[in-house]
Amino acid sequence: MELLVKLLHPAAQLPRGAHPGDAGADLCSVESVTIPPGERRDVGTGLALAIPAGYAGFVQPRSGLAFKHGIMVVNSPGLIDSGYRGEIRVSLYNSGRDPFEVKVGERIAQLVIQRIEEPHYLSVRVLPDTSRGDGGFGSSGR
C-alpha cells in the first residue's frame, strides 16, 4: 500500500517505522513546545495525508514517552478519517511531574493505518445472547 503524504512544513518528515514490520510509523514534531505537568498542548506534524477510502489512521502514543516522561496522546487513539486532508496535529498530555520539552524533529506519536468496515446500522428489539451478556466494567473480575 502506498500512502500519499503532503509535507506542509520545511521540518516535516515522512512517517517511518523504527523497525521492519512495525505496525506504527513515527510522527515527528515540526514545533518546539513546552508541556507543563498536568497540561496538554496541540503539536503539529507538518503532514497531510490522503488515506484511501475504506481505511482510517489512528494516532497512538509512543510507549517510551509515556513510560519515561508521562507523555500521552489525549484522545488516544486519535482518529483520522479518510476524507480529512488537513494537517495531522497531535494533542499531547503531560501526566508527569516535570515540564516536557518537545523539540523540532522529535518523535511524538505513532500512526497506524487500518482497514475499516462501514456497517449498515439496523435497529432491533432484541440482540442475540452471548455468554457475557450485558456485563460491563469489572464484569470479568479485577
Image: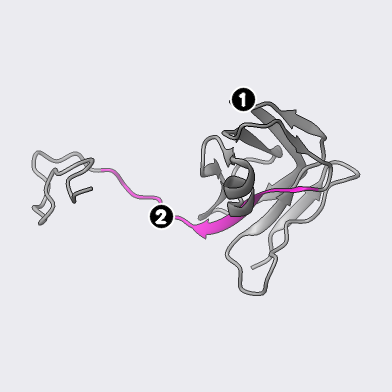
Label 2 is placed on what type of residue? Glu
Compare marks 2 and 1 and give the one earlier in the sequence: 1
Q: Which residue is mark 2?
A: 117
Residue 72: % across, % down: 57, 40
Relative to the observer, which residue lies in front, 60 or 67? 67
Mark 2 residue crowding within 10 angstroms, few (<14) / some (14–19) / many (20+): few
Task: Specify the quadrant that holds the N terminus.
Answer: bottom right
Label 1 is placed on what type of residue? Glu
Q: Which residue is mark 1?
A: 39
Residue range corresponding to the magenta coloring:
106-121
Q: Give the residue at x 13% y 43%.
A: 134
Q: CA distance from mark 2 to mark 1?
A: 35 Å
**Going by the picture, which residue comes out furthest to the front?**
97
In the image, which disc is placed on residue 115?
Answer: none
The stretch drawn in magenta includes residue 111: yes
Q: Give the residue at x 69% y 55%.
A: 26
Count of marks overlaid on the render: 2
Q: From this view, report whether residue 47 is shown above or below residue 40.
A: below
Q: Give the residue at x 82% y 41%.
A: 103
Residue 141: % across, % down: 19, 49
Residue 36: % across, % down: 68, 26
Q: Nearer the viewer, mark 2 or mark 1?
A: 1
| Cβ atoms under marks 2 and 1 closer than 8 Å | no
- Circle 2 SS class: loop
Residue 106: % across, % down: 78, 48
**Going by the picture, which residue comes out furthest to the right?**
10
The stretch drawn in magenta includes residue 89: no
Colour scheme employed for the rendering of this structure = one colour
Q: From this view, report whether residue 1 is shown above or below residue 133.
A: below
Relative to the observer, which residue lies in front, 18 or 98? 98
